[in-house]
Image (spheres, rainbow, N blue to C red):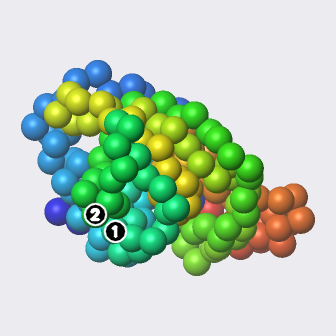
Amino acid sequence: MVLEITQYGNPVLRKKCRVVEGVDDALLQLADDMIETMVDANGVGLAAPQIGQDIRMAVVDVAHDPDCVSFLRVNGVDTKIDDIMPLVFINPVLELNGPRESESEGCLSIYDIRANVRRPSAIHARLPQLDGSVIELETDGLLARAIQHEVDHLNGVLFVDRISPAAKVSMKRKLRRLAAQ
Ligand code: NI
């Protein structure tokens, strides 16, 4: 089922989301619905607060762009992007590596705004899965950026919080208009 995506100004987007304590059928269904919602919206990621749930769960799918990373290791083994997409995770732990790089980002909860965001280029992520397993994922490129963006959502942080002060000034009116809708 395609769910409604919460929009900028909704307080749930500013919540520090709760740890997922257990996985039940409702959570599995929610994960499926989040994937469907992300695909429907042509997004590369979606976090639970974006569908109104303040829990630490997110989905990512960058399979449309298999060359968007220069490396991908899952549990220490070189892996193809296709083999782990769509990626669903709960209670992620991130270690950020590499020099910061600036790339354009957008967000399904912030309509029609894109801006360059500087983020570390690589990550080592510990991503618990819904089946109780845990994957250790090391990567860079768009996948590293998408996971950082989604983990930010779980902490109530939006990409517009991370843009340069100058870019923020020029975006301010647009954001105010969005928040007022
Ligand atoms: Ni987003």
Quarter of the image for residue 53 reads top left
Disc on the earlier residue, 2 or 1: 1
Q: Which mark is residue 81?
A: none
Disc 1 residue: CB within 8 Å of ligand 1: no
Mark 2 Cα shell of 10 Å, populated few (<14), some (14-19), many (≥20)? some
Query: Is residue 58 something that shows in the picture?
Result: no
- Residue 178: x, y in percent? 62, 68
Residue 117 placement, left or right of 84: right
Discs 2, 1 touching: Cβ within 8 Å: yes
Q: Residue at x 17, y 34 (%)?
A: 131
Going by the numbered disc 2, the residue's amino acid type is Asp
Q: Is residue 92 above or below residue 73?
A: above
Residue ID for mark 2:
82
Q: What is the secondary structure assignment of the residue under circle 2?
A: helix
Residue ID for mark 1:
63
Going by the numbered disc 1, the residue's amino acid type is Ala
Residue 176 placement, left or right of 148: right
Asked whether 50 or 138 is in front, the reply is 138
